[in-house]
Amino acid sequence: MSEQSLSAVEAELYDRQIRLWGIESQEKLRAANVLLINCRGLGCEIAKNILLSGINSLTVLDDSLVTEEEQIKNFFLTKESIGKKLAEAILPKAQSLNPLVKITADCENPVEKNANFFEAFTIIITTGIKTDLVLKLDKICRINKVKLISGDVFGMFGFSVADFLNHEYYEDRVQMLPKKRTQDGSVKTTIQVKGQIDYPELNKVLIFPNTKQSIDAIKKSNRRNGLFFLMLTLLEFRNENGRNPQISTKTDDIEKLKIIKKSIVGLYKISTSIFEDSLFEQSFGEVVPVCAILGGVIAQEVIKAVSHKEITINNIFLLDPVTFNGKEECVGA
Amino acid sequence: MQLDRTPCVLGEEARSLVKEAKILVVGAGGIGCEVLKNLALSGFQDIEIIDLDTIDVSNLNRQFLFRKEHVGKPKAVVARETILGYNPDIKVKAYHDSITSQEYGVNFFKQFSLVLNALDNRAARNHVNRMCLAADIPLIESGTAGYSGQVELIKKGVTQCYECQPKPTQKTYPGCTIRNTPSEPVHCIVWAKHLFNQLFGEEDPDQDVSPDSEDPEAKTEDGHSMTDTGNVKRISTRQWAQEIDYNPTQLFNKFFFEDIEYLLKMENLWKSRKPPVPIKWEEATTDGEKTEVKDDDNIKNTDMKVWSINKCAQVFAKTVDVLKKELSGRNFLVWDKDDQPGMDFVTACANIRSHIFSIQMQSKFSTKSIAGSIIPAIATANAIVAGLVVLHAFRALQEQYERCSAVYLRRKSKFSKFVLAADNELQKANPVCYVCSPKPFVNVFVNTNTMTVKEFENEILKKQLNMIAPDVVLDGKFVVVISSEEGETQANDNKTLVEMSVVEGTVLKCDDFLQNYELQIAVNHYEAKEKDDPLFKVAVNPEDLKAKEDIKNGGANGKKEENHDEDSDDEPTIVENPPEDPQEGSSSKRRKLNPPEDSDDDLIVLDEIIE
């Protein structure tokens, strides 16, 4: 299934979204091949939304085994899945969401994959991986013109970071033409407005203490959203500990987070009041409705990136765990 | 031992509130499915679902609790089965029913800790709003339309209610625009739907499709209408169509040639307009290429392309034939956008009429949008809004109402960093709201000489003021004008308001027992003068009407006619750009059209970064 136009069956199934983004977008979606790395709490939300949207294929790369903790928050899994390979266990329910999409499970470790494995995709989505793998993937993606978006949920907090390369997009704008005659109503026409966003490569965006990267591009703005630094702190916690903060070791983990925050604040020469330490309390677990929000935002970015319709978020999205504001933060450009 | 699904960041007390809570989810559509999944996976253990609808194929791109084999089954029932699959240890009850039904009174609502609305129409939202106010149960209201959406808490005495701010009324079109002087595609589509009803549907005198000789614009200088000079009083369209056995050529020539010729005689109409060009069957069918009406499995060629006049005529003839057969043995057909022959018939007729009036013709795809009042809907917006609904639910259960200010999902724009924009504080109740203020009061403007009691009940009390079963008495006297008891005031139904002594200055006491809602209505006598004037008006302050009309003019894009909620799956609440959304819109406030970003100093940086 690729460039040929939509069948009547597809038109009926996707009717309500085609009325929003148009048939051209739908045709681009159905030609898209998507790789999702890790399909846990956030991952299954993203997978659900892009399967429903009608892409050509989805490959789920996840080397974990299903635990009971994972099973209860992942709607692709059942009690029978526990102990099985996650990527394979999600297949039946994932496929039932949309029989038209080709879904493939891959249970290998993403770190051990050859670079050429990643070349074939239109876009790669990652969740829950360490920064060094994100940066490695970004290098491969840049060479092969593959788009990349990476997201995480830490408790009530969530974010995404995108590298959509030199992304061209268009938007429809409705214009009112002057009235033709004296009588009722004016004439509306729709025009296409084109734009381009040049995304910075991610090694200019995700910079931690003890690396040689220059932080000048990030420092350019002195009015950074403090949540950006919360994001860096949590990512660095995972980089150092090989896991996310856990409620069972809450006190210790908060201490570790405070130490990491200190070094990040030092690197960027900003005040520790850039965000409240109390936000660490909100960073445990993977809160399902927050996964739903981030899963919606990330899937929508994937749809926009693939279809080139509508402006994308450039380049970071940050969900405020207290106010529920969700804002774009442009970093590294 | 069972694992605890409640989020660990909530704290012990909140986690037990979640486990003990009893939640009502009203609507199992786009947002409802997502909300139910979030509830089941977040440790809620007692959930009830109510939805009137059954599952349609076009739901499956986002209502992910349903699959193809569920098409035709009740949404509430299937949604229950699917979420029990996520968590078999919880209690879920499903009602395949309307929430406005008498069975769900104030006591029904009182058993819940929280009500979550995931509705698709304003009437049901208004009703649940009133029930939750009456039962004093917090309500989380939500909606999406395309890329946009919103979530807000409604709590008696704490926030505004769903009806505190007047919402833009639905655009309707004056009869003479539809019958005599269409100027936009929508006018021809409305006309085509009326034609369907005249020929095959339930006859409605307000849906006449023939030229209107009483059009004030058509009157000659000496004030004579055309009626006395030439309007032949003929038998009903339906009767005539049956007499000629729905002969397509004769029907075609009547609607697209003779009636148009007649319109041309009303010369005043065409002084400043381009006159229509009548077209005969023979002409339409020989015109241009020979079109084969082929069932091509390629949607771009069938639905997305504008049909030629020849094709329109062929489709007209073919569908008239099919519909005639469907009608035989039945009293009438009900038009439905998803019914092929009916939709094809409307597409063909609307386009032939557009052609006659030099209006741009439309593809079947866009005709369907307008004729079916379809609100686009996507999975992602529903997922985001439903996530916010359940986050609000966590806070509302802890009675942290001040932390539940409204949040708006917006289509990403170059000019703003916000995708989700939260209000800084709760919206306070309107002190003169005709629903939630201590002494609800409203002015209605009706023609007391011509409006009947039945019309007053249906058009004003039920449609405008959203009552379900009102009782009405004349204030001060003990005259019962309308009773909710079956038959009790039937004798009044066809009397005019004047005949019941309801005149300028009369105050009516209305009571809806189900909604536990009392309203005083001041009656104002009003006669529509211009042809665009509404037939009646409703307002707390008569001065508000002025402002309301301005909004309407700025905001309506004229897509809708009467049945606006016909297909809005996921409840349309807002719109970011007024011209884009004709809908039910903006739930409560227009203020949200200008979101709270001016208060956010980050915004200043925006231009440096983006430009």
Image (cartoon, coloured by chain):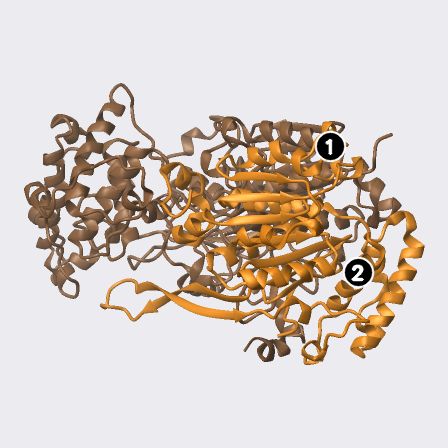
Chain colours: A orange, B brown
Front residue of this view, candidates B506 and A180: A180
**Badge count:** 2
Q: Nearer the viewer, mark 1 or mark 2?
A: 1
Q: Quadrant of residue B137?
A: top right
Q: CA distance from mark 1 to mark 2?
A: 29 Å
Residue A144 image offset from top left, x and y in percent:
54, 60
> What residue is rendered at 83% in x and 67% in y?
A276
Q: Which residue is mark 1?
A: A84
Question: Where the N terminus of chain B falls, by quadrant?
Answer: top right
Amino acid carrying label 1: it is Lys
Amino acid carrying label 2: it is Leu
Chain identifier of the residue bearing label 1 in the image: A
B274 is higher (above) or lower (below) than B33: below
Q: Earlier in the sequence, mark 1 or mark 2?
A: 1
B505 is higher (above) or lower (below) than B609: above
Q: Can residue A177 be seen in the rendering of this structure?
A: yes
Residue A272 image offset from top left, x and y in percent:
85, 73
Chain identifier of the residue bearing label 2 in the image: A
Same subunit: marks 1 and 2:
yes
Residue B210 placement, left or right of B601? left
Front residue of this view, candidates A327 and B150: A327
> What residue is rendered at 19% in x and 48% in y?
B353
Q: Can residue B434 be seen in the rendering of this structure?
A: no
Question: Where the C terminus of chain B falls, by quadrant?
Answer: bottom right
Front residue of this view, candidates B534 and A175: A175
> What residue is rendered at 89% in x and 66% in y?
A259
Q: Secondary structure at mark 1?
A: loop
Q: Which residue is mark 2?
A: A234
B374 is higher (above) or lower (below) than B99: below
Residue B388 placement, left or right of B66? right
